[in-house]
Image: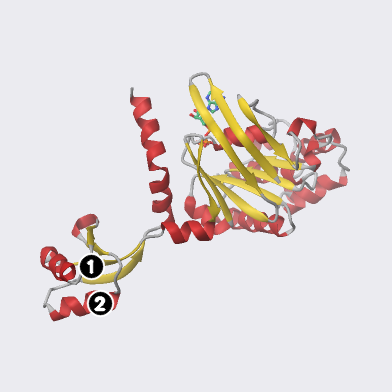
Amino acid sequence: MIEVQNLTKRYGETLAVDRLSFRVLPGRVTGFLGPNGAGKSTTMRAVVGLDRPTAGRVLIDGKPYRELARPLTKVGVLLEAKALHGGRTAYGHLLGLARSNRIPDRRVREVLETVGLGGTAKKRAGGFSLGMAQRLGVAAALLGDPEVLLFDEPVNGLDPEGILWIRGLMKKLAAEGRTVFVSSHLMSEMALTAEHLIVIGQGRLLADTSVEDFIARNSRSYILIRTPEPERMRDVLAAKGIHTDDGPDGVLEAVGTTLETVGSLASANRVTVYEISPRTASLEEAFMQLTADSVDYRATQEVR
Ligand SMILES: Nc1ncnc2c1ncn2[C@@H]1O[C@H](COP(=O)(O)OP(=O)(O)OP(=O)(O)O)[C@@H](O)[C@H]1O
């Protein structure tokens, strides 16, 4: 389990993380979501002791990272995928890490196979594509067979096959009972991978909820109506107590009603319609709405 307690991190004038508290539980993938600059990477760096908190603390199974005797056997982390020594081979890079944590050499081969780099073990990492570097980063995270795993934007640079692979891997690791914490700025990606969500904006907690709940609360359903007579259609619906919003390109969005009701009312009142279809606002839209205030605030600040 990861416990973030009242974490605050300042870089000079910038308040990157602001009194943030949450827990990441084992046995499920927890998504860490926030717009660019929300403070996700800073929080992750604080979890693994790479950034010193201005206030607050982070505990891993009750202990700060720096008190872990062989940290790689407790926590695996994928942060900046390209942060590796370009002159080293994939094998050499992992061997160095393994020996520094008294992990047996044979484990290096195992993790290289797991991430699909078995055939490129002797290649210099400097020549790796971003996708290969990403896989090597995942191999390093898995090296110590840790109970806790952190992945910062792991799908970056991966091709569609790689994305499917990493989603499957994260779910498998969680199913084994591990704590899996993964950051992204894409709600759609998280909806496919995570069971639970921690959403932040401007370094503050905006939501700590199951993905299921987030979808139920935030997905707005409506009936889209495309008509050359929007005013008449609006009046016909209003007469029955049905509210309509204006959608993009002159369409109407009727809420709290059904396709059948709208169709029957249009027909009974001889309103011409070109399209009537049920729609659900995307999760991406819901996420943008939730974080809109924090993004606006940041943009205004930068202009000044
Ligand atoms: N080393 C640093 N020095 C100064 N400011 C920093 C540093 N690291 C991060 N920041 C600032 O702290 C804020 C949070 O950054 P952070 O990288 O944690 O956000 P993020 O949510 O990971 O964003 P992204 O999705 O863009 O990676 C930003 O305003 C960023 O500019």
Q: Quadrant of residue 127?
A: top right
Residue 195 pos. (x, y %): 59, 57
Label 1 and label 2: CA atoms lie apart by: 10 Å
Q: Is residue 153 above or below residue 304?
A: below
Q: Quadrant of residue 136?
A: top right
State the residue in front, 93 or 282: 282
Question: Seen from this angle, which residue lies furthest top?
Answer: 12
Residue 204 pos. (x, y %): 50, 37
Task: Give the residue drawn at x 74%, y 56%.
Answer: 177
**Disc number placed over residue 261 in the picture, else none:** 2
Q: Amino acid at mark 1?
A: Ile
Q: Is residue 220 above or below residue 197?
A: below
Residue 80 visible, this angle: no
Q: Residues within 10 Å of mark 1 (few under 14, many from 20)?
A: some
Q: Residues within 10 Å of mark 2 (few under 14, many from 20)?
A: few
Give the mark count.
Answer: 2
Q: What residue is pinned by disc 1?
A: 242
Secondary structure of the residue carrying tag 1 is loop
Horizontally, residue 197 falls left or right of residue 2, namely left
Q: Is residue 90 above or below residue 223?
A: above
Task: Give the residue drawn at x 58%, y 32%.
Answer: 42
Q: Are marks 1 and 2 in contact (CB under 8 Å)?
A: yes
State the residue in front, 251 or 92: 251
Task: Give the residue drawn at x 64%, y 33%.
Answer: 45
**Disc number placed over residue 110 in the picture, else none:** none
Horizontally, residue 234 falls left or right of residue 157, namely left
Q: Is mark 1 within 8 Å of ligand 1?
A: no
Residue 44 visible, this angle: yes
Secondary structure of the residue carrying tag 2 is helix
Residue 172 pos. (x, y %): 69, 59
Q: Amino acid at mark 2?
A: Thr
